[in-house]
Image (spheres, rainbow, N blue to C red):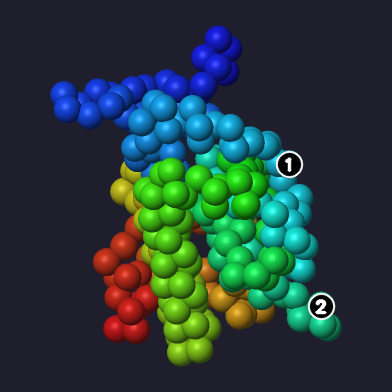
């Protein structure tokens, strides 16, 4: 952070209110950042509980059953959340990206494993210290409630995805949702990275690796997508792919 001890990069002042932090040197998430909207005085207090960590790819950030001591928000990279059955089978429950929260728990232990897909940078908050700030900064509690609500909505979408959709509809839904998070314009299509493996996609959608590969190839042959390499995809006909995702 250099000489910027507080990590404050941008401050805006309303004519009637205290200066408000719009971003800090820890990330470039802007309004998506957990600390966005705090006054400079609140930000100073907030920084006393904030830790930051850089995590190498394929590293377990925490495991299912570990004591739930911290909450995390991603500032760079991608993370997968999963649960293991007793026979070793794995169900990936979510892929997370910058701005996403994880580590939420209703009891004293984590209900899933969190593992980095790429090099990941996170802001890390001791759970008890963060909860102690809520009386001082109700907006933080409101943001955390919003993250909990989003997690519940995502779980409901995942149940629909696993329970009612065909393999083709599942892959279409996965690509449409991912495009909205990671899209980057490239020629006639929209190119974005696939930070996860085919095996990860299969374990997220409840399919085999062979079915994932075969279905992706089928979508490519139809001209709906292109696959420049194993780590990228471009959606060429987004409206048609969205219709498939919706079961049309």
Q: Indicate the quadrant containing the N terminus: top left, top right, bottom left or bottom right.
A: top right
The label shown at residue 112 is none
**Could you classify mark 2 by the number of other residues whose Cα lies within 10 Å: few (under 14), some (14-19), or many (20 or more)?**
few
Residue 248 visible in this rendered orientation of the protein = yes
Is 7 or 189 nearer to us in this picture?
A: 7
Disc 2: which residue: 88
Which residue sits furthest left?
15
Name the quadrant containing residue 60. Answer: bottom right
* Residue positioned 37% across, 76% down in the render: 245
x%, y% of residue 227? 51, 56
Question: In the image, 88: left or right of 219?
Answer: right
* Residue positioned 32% across, 70% down in the render: 242
Is 230 or 193 nearer to us in this picture?
A: 193
Question: In the image, 133: left or right of 63?
Answer: left
Disc 1: which residue: 56
Of label 1 and label 2, which has the lower sequence position?
1
What element does badge 2 sit on?
loop
Is 88 rendered above or below residue 120?
A: below
* Residue positioned 41% across, 67% down in the render: 149
Residue 228 visible in this rendered orientation of the protein = no
* Residue positioned 22% across, 29% down in the render: 17
What element does badge 1 sit on?
loop
* Cα distance between the residues tagged 1 and 2: 24 Å
Which residue sits furthest front?
135
x%, y% of residue 114? 68, 59
């Amino acid at each position: 952070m250099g000489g910027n001890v507080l990590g404050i990069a941008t401050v805006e002042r309303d004519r009637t209110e205290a200066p408000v932090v719009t971003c800090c040197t820890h990330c470039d998430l802007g309004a998506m950042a957990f600390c966005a909207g705090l006054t400079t005085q609140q930000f100073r207090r907030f920084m006393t509980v904030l830790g930051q960590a850089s995590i190498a790819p394929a590293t377990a950030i925490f495991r299912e059953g570990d004591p739930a001591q911290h909450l995390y928000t991603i500032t760079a990279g991608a993370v997968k959340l999963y649960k293991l059955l007793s026979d070793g089978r794995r169900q990936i429950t979510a892929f997370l990206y910058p701005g996403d929260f994880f580590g939420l728990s209703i009891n004293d232990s984590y209900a899933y494993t969190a593992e980095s897909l790429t090099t990941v940078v996170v802001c890390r908050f001791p759970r008890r210290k963060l909860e102690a700030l809520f009386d001082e900064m109700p907006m933080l509690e409101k943001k955390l409630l919003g993250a909990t609500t989003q997690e519940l909505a995502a779980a409901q979408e995942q149940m629909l995805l696993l329970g009612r959709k065909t393999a083709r509809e599942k892959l279409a839904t996965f690509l449409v949702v991912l495009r909205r998070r990671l899209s980057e314009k490239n020629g006639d299509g929209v190119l974005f990275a696939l930070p996860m493996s085919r095996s990860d996609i299969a374990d997220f959608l409840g399919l085999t690796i062979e079915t994932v590969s075969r279905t992706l190839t089928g979508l490519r042959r139809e001209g709906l997508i292109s696959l420049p390499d194993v780590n990228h995809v471009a959606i060429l006909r987004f409206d048609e792919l969205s219709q498939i995702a919706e079961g049309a």
